[in-house]
Amino acid sequence: MRALRFDQTLVYQPQNPEPSPAEGDTLIAITTAGICSTDLEICKGYMGFAGILGHEFVGVVLESPAPELVGRRVCGEINIVCGTCSLCCSGLSNHCTNRSVLGILKHPGAFAERVRLPAANLHLVPDSVDDEQAVFVEPLAAAFQILRQVPITPQTTITVLGDGRLGLLVAQVLRNTGALVCLVGRHPKKLALCEKWSIQTQLFSEALPGHDQDVVVDCTGSAAGFELAMGMVRPRGTLVLKSTVAIGKAMNLAPLVIDEITVVGSRCGPFPEAIRALESRRVDVASLIHHRMPLGQGVQAMALATSPGVLKVLLTVRD
C-alpha cells in the first residue's frame, strides 16, 4: 500500500502494511486528501506523532458492517473514541480520555491508498459535492463549531485573525450569520478572495487594538496574533482560539482578567452542518485550492504547502 509517512523525516513509501481491522471496522479507499496546517506542524514535532499522516479525506467504502456504506463516498470524523469513559457518556466524546486521532495521535492517517475507521465516524457525501469539495468537510466543520460555542447575531461585530485555510473558512461561516465580519491577514492575494464574499479585510500591519470587537477568532497560531486578539476584543467580549499550535512565548495575560474576557478553545465540529453548507454552495472552497498533486509527490506537496501565499494543496490518491 502506498503512503506518506513521517518518522523524524517525511518519506513516500510505495509499500506499507494494509490497515489492520483493529484500526476500525470499515475499510476505505482514499480518493483525495487535503494537507492541513496540523500535518505541517507534526513534521516539526507537534504531538510527537510518527506514522502515516493526513486527516482530511474523501474515499469509497470497500467493506463495512454497515452495508449501506459499501460502495458509497464518505468523509470521516477524526476522533476514534471508546464510547464508555465518563466524557463519552456525558456527550463529550471528542474529548474521550482513550481517544486516538486520525493521522495525529495513535492512528494511521489518510495520506495512503486505504484507511480504516469505525463506521460510526463516517458521513455519506452527497452526489452534488465532488471529491475536491468533500475534502474540506473536516476543517469546515471546525469552523461551524464556533456557532455551537458562541452566540452570534447579525448585530455581533467579529474579527477573524489569519488569512490561511482555516481563517478563510471561519470568515465565510460567520459571514453567513449576517454578522459584520472583518478578516485580518498578511497576504493581499488571500485577502482579495474576501471581496466576492462580502467580507471586510485589513492587513495585519494596519490592524489596531481598538478593544471594540464582540468576538475575535484567532486562527494565526502565533504570539503576535494572540496579542492582537487581546487588544481587539472589547471588555466582556469573547476570544476564540482555533489554532492548535502552542504559542510558547511568555505573554502578559492580565488583560484577559482586567477586561473579563471569555476565552473559548474551539476544535472539531459538526460534519452534517459542513456537508449541508457545501451542498447548498453557501461556502466557497474551490477558490482555496491552489495545487493538486499525486500521492507519489507527497513530500513535494507538503513542502509546497508551507510556501507563502499557498492555500490548500490536495493529494490525489486514486483516479
Image (cartoon, helix red, strand yellow):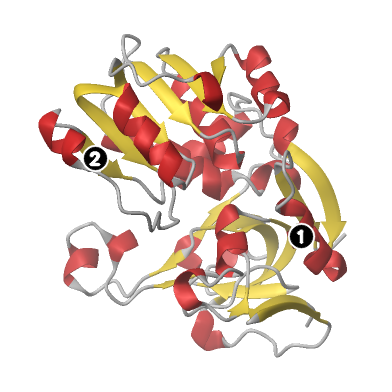
Mark 2 crowdedness (10 Å alpha carbons): few <14, some 14-19, many ≥20: some
Percent of width and height locating residue 120? 44, 64
Q: Closer to the camera, 231 or 138?
A: 231
Q: In the displayed structure, would residue 77 be above or below residue 208?
A: below
Q: Residue at x 48, y 77 (%)?
A: 48
Q: In the displayed structure, would residue 125 be above or below residue 2?
A: above
Q: Is residue 11 left or right of residue 65?
A: right
Secondary element under disc 1, as helix, strand or loop, is: helix
Q: Amino acid at mark 2?
A: Val
Q: Amino acid at mark 1?
A: Ala
Q: Earlier in the sequence, mark 2 or mark 1?
A: 2
Determine the image quadrant of residue 71. bottom right
Mark 1 crowdedness (10 Å alpha carbons): few <14, some 14-19, many ≥20: few
Determine the image quadrant of residue 80. bottom left
Percent of width and height locating residue 146? 36, 36
Mark 2 touching mark 1, by CB under 8 A?
A: no
Q: Residue at x 73, y 26 (%)?
A: 189
The residue singled out by tag 2 in the image is: 263
> Residue 148's mark?
none
Q: Is residue 248 visible?
A: yes
Percent of width and height locating residue 108? 58, 77
Q: Is residue 112 left or right of residue 318?
A: left
The residue singled out by tag 1 in the image is: 303
Q: In the displayed structure, would residue 225 be above or below residue 93?
A: above
Percent of width and height locating residue 314? 76, 52
Q: Closer to the camera, 271 or 95?
A: 95
In space, the residues marked 2 and 1 are separated at their CA atoms by: 33 Å
Q: In the displayed structure, would residue 266 be above or below residue 1?
A: above
